[in-house]
Amino acid sequence: MGVKLSGSLPKDDDANGMERLNSQLIRYPERRHLVVMVVDTDRINQKHDGRGGLRSEPTAGILFIEPVTDEEDVDTVLDVMSRVRAERVDDATLDFDFGVGDQFTKAANDLRTASGISFDEASNE
């Protein structure tokens, strides 16, 4: 049993924000990107289970998809994903690394924040 995901993105520009990632996906194919999706049931296939019965196999269809690029928004969504994942797999580890974002940039920002230097002050020195 498993849920499949339809490979089709919404055709309507109002429902599909993936174009915003076009240049990033081409320029940095090794990077991961965070997106938020709203899905529904696209179809349900009936498969023979090998014991004379049928099992249902749903395929989710993407209704809306938006990339999350703002650093604070990325952190917020990753916090939610970590919590939900920990609950789903019964693992208390909330600091799971999804490999999203530039960890060196984040570390530099954390260091600047901790030191009290803002980006404006750093550029004026």
Image: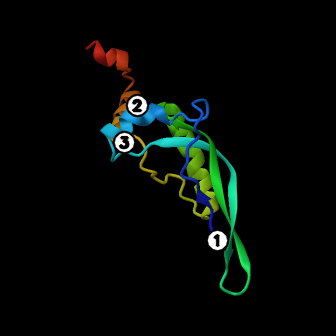
Seen in the picture, residue 119 relative to 17 is either above or below; the reply is above
Residue at image x 57%, y 49%?
81
Badge 2 density bin: few <14, some 14–19, many ≥20, Cα 10 Å: few
Tag 2 and tag 3, C-beta contact below 8 Å? no
Q: In the drawing, what numbered circle is on residue 103?
A: 3
Q: From this viewpoint, which residue is outermost toward the left? A: 125
Residue at image x 34%, y 39%?
26
- Residue 27: image quadrant is top left
Seen in the picture, residue 114 relative to 99 is either above or below; the reply is above
Q: From this viewpoint, which residue is outermost toward the bottom? A: 51
The residue under label 1 is which amino acid type? Answer: Met
Q: CA distance from mark 3 to mark 1?
A: 36 Å
- Kind of element beneath mark 3: helix
Query: Label 2, on which residue?
Result: 114
Query: Label 1, on which residue?
Result: 1
Q: Earlier in the sequence, mark 3 or mark 1?
A: 1
- Kind of element beneath mark 2: helix
Residue at image x 71%, y 74%?
55
Badge 1 density bin: few <14, some 14–19, many ≥20, Cα 10 Å: few
Tag 3 and tag 1, C-beta contact below 8 Å? no
Q: Earlier in the sequence, mark 2 or mark 1?
A: 1
Q: Earlier in the sequence, mark 2 or mark 3?
A: 3
Mark 2 or 1, closer to the camera? 1
Residue at image x 29%, y 16%?
123
Q: Position of residue 77 (x, y in %)?
A: 56, 41
